[in-house]
Amino acid sequence: MNKISPKSLLHSKWTKVSIINKEKHFAVTKVSYDEEQRIEECIIQAVINNNEYNINWRDLKDPQQWKLGWQ
């Protein structure tokens, strides 16, 4: 399991294990919190083409889907 703190999520870099549309490397560009400081929105951006995707930040913890850093 990838260890990630919600507070260090913004600007973190990720590598997708299964590549789709040549999008392999991503960076977290936006994290929104609710009034209790829980993450309610996480936006990642593909480095190759700047496409943005709204994802569940907990999916980044799954090593079958994501690797921390650009690899």
Image: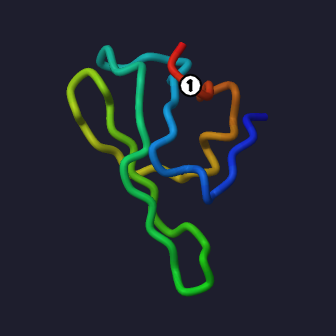
* Left or right of 3 on screen, residue 58: left
Dot 1 surroundings within 10 Å: few (below 14), some, or many (20 or more)?
few
Q: Quadrant of the C terminus?
A: top right
Q: Quadrant of the N terminus?
A: top right
Residue found at x 45% / y 56%: 42
Q: Which quarter of the picture shows residue 30?
A: bottom left
- Camera-side residue of 54 and 50: 50
Residue at the right extreme?
Answer: 1
Position of residue 2 measured from the top left corner of the image (x, y, whole percent): 73, 35
Vertical placement of residue 67 versus 19, above or below: below
Q: How is the image coloured?
A: rainbow
Position of residue 40 measured from the top left corner of the image (x, y, whole percent): 50, 69
Residue found at x 69% / y 45%: 4
* Left or right of 3 on screen, residue 16: left
Residue found at x 28% / y 43%: 52
Q: How many marks?
A: 1
Position of residue 65 measured from the top left corner of the image (x, y, whole percent): 60, 28
* Left or right of 52 on screen, residue 42: right
- Camera-side residue of 49 and 19: 49
- What is the secondary structure assignment of the residue under circle 1? loop
Q: Where does label 1 land, which residue?
A: 69
Q: Which quarter of the picture shows residue 32?
A: bottom left
Residue at the left extreme?
Answer: 49
Position of residue 56 measured from the top left corner of the image (x, y, whole percent): 53, 53
Identity, as a three-letter code, of the amino acid under mark 1: Gly
